[in-house]
Amino acid sequence: MAGSQESLTPDPRFIGKKKGPGAYRKPHKRMYHFHNFARAYRSWLVPYVKSRIFSREFRPVLSFLYTDLNCNIDCHYCYTNNKVPGMTRQVAEDSVDWLRSTGCRVLAYMGGEPLLRKRFIVDLTHYAVQRGFFVYLPTNGILLDQDFIDEIGEAGVSTINLAVDAIDRRDGLPKYFERIKPQFEYLVQQEHQYGYITFLNINITESNAEDVRRLTEIAHEYGIATDYHINEPPLIRYDTFKHEEDGGWIMEEQYQVVDGVIDWLIQKNLEGYTMVNSLEHLKNMKKFIRHQLPSWPCQAGQMTMIIRLDGSFAPCFELYGDEEDWGNIYDGPKFDSIRLTERKLTCSPHCLSTCNFQGYHYTRSSLYSLQWVAKHAYAHFMGVS
Ligand SMILES: C[S@@+](CC[C@H](N)C(=O)[O-])C[C@H]1O[C@@H](n2cnc3c(N)ncnc32)[C@H](O)[C@@H]1O
Ligand code: SF4
Ligand code: SF4
């Protein structure tokens, strides 16, 4: 690894404050945390409680909207990088309106790389925020710049999830910290002004165990949260996917090294590092890589869903290319519960979807649901890390 330690030292203007053993905190005022708590309460907890009360109605709590499948880089593990036209503004706005009518209030963009069309994303964010949505923006960060950060902050984005897998350039992992450090620091600097939350999103692959540790420490020093995926081979075969053989899949020879980083993350989680992943999700990663994951009660197609470029529906990211008809924004949903249950018996042992696993975990009881909201307040209270 070539990156010098010096270049990774956080700028003191952005670093979190150290409070207590091993725990950095953002240098933000109480209002920032309260604002995030209140927003998460309104857009996650209230719709979730209503979905339980009106359990016969289709009321997703979180929906992913695919605005583009194209991307400006080529992560070898990614099978969504296709050259096709993006979602139209009409379909995007109709999707927001339809979601609103179901009671959903969390809109997560997905891709591809959403920032290939920055104006589209800023305008859509204005549209959705005015209609009461919590807007989540995932990005590889390469096209982020100060003007965009200010514009999307003004538009009212709630969370910016910056995906990065390595410290320096690596084969097959083009999302690396050194490439986006200035944008990352500006994002963190502007958090307080606009009230959004920044995350680092890290995919654990066969080759980046040491990078995962270093990225986790960087996030911690800047006082921001992390979110981990375990690298998953595609469940569906895509003709456009070019990296069947070199997608960073975790093979038997790497189990020990990957176990080591997972154990380290579990330890850091217990020490109070703020992570989206539950301990249970982290522990299950070891079973997942060994193909020993038992079937689990995934909530895709019920609490979560995806909307494709043309406005059609599917239960989840992993089933983007599924050929079954699950409905669309104009004709309504066709998430038949028997079909979903049958499907999950076969797909869930081969999938550890970060979003859907947390969905299942944090909705198991009222206490877990409150923990989820508390994570947004980022206050480390109630034992939330
Ligand atoms: C598909 S990308 C789209 C948004 C943006 N381009 C980005 O990279 O964050 C969303 C997330 O999916 C994750 N992802 C993509 N392919 C994956 C795979 N095979 N296994 C696990 N996570 C994957 C990426 O690491 C990224 O965090
Ligand atoms: S993971 Fe994100 S950045 Fe990487 S190729 Fe896929 S869409 Fe692009
Ligand atoms: S288990 Fe995975 S593939 Fe199956 S429905 Fe859930 S998220 Fe989709």
Image (tube, grey):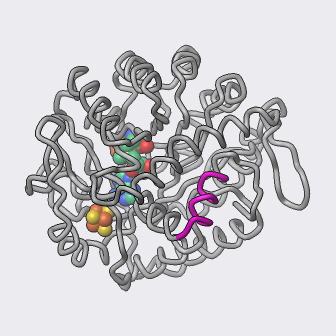
- Examine the rendering and report whether any part of residue 36 can be seen: yes
Q: Is residue 95 magenta?
A: no
Residue placed at 25% from the left, 20% from the top? 89
The image position of residue 326, as x and y in percent, is: 14, 52
280 or 374, nearer to the observer: 374
364 or 252, nearer to the observer: 364
- Examine the rendering and report whether any part of residue 171 can be seen: no
Residue placed at 34% from the left, 35% from the top? 100
Depicted 44 relative to depicted 360: above or below:
above
Residue placed at 65% from the left, 24% from the top? 194
Q: Could you tell me which quadrant the C terminus lies in?
A: bottom right
73 or 158, nearer to the observer: 158
Q: Is residue 375 left or right of residue 126?
A: right
View extreme (front): residue: 53
Q: Which residues are magenta?
A: 365-374
Most common SS among magenta residues: helix
The image position of residue 90, as x and y in percent, is: 21, 21
Residue placed at 59% from the left, 56% from the top? 372
The image position of residue 290, as x and y in percent, is: 39, 82
Depicted 348 relative to depicted 303: above or below:
below
The image position of residue 98, as x and y in percent, is: 26, 34
View extreme (right): residue: 20
Q: Is residue 307 left or right of residue 16?
A: left
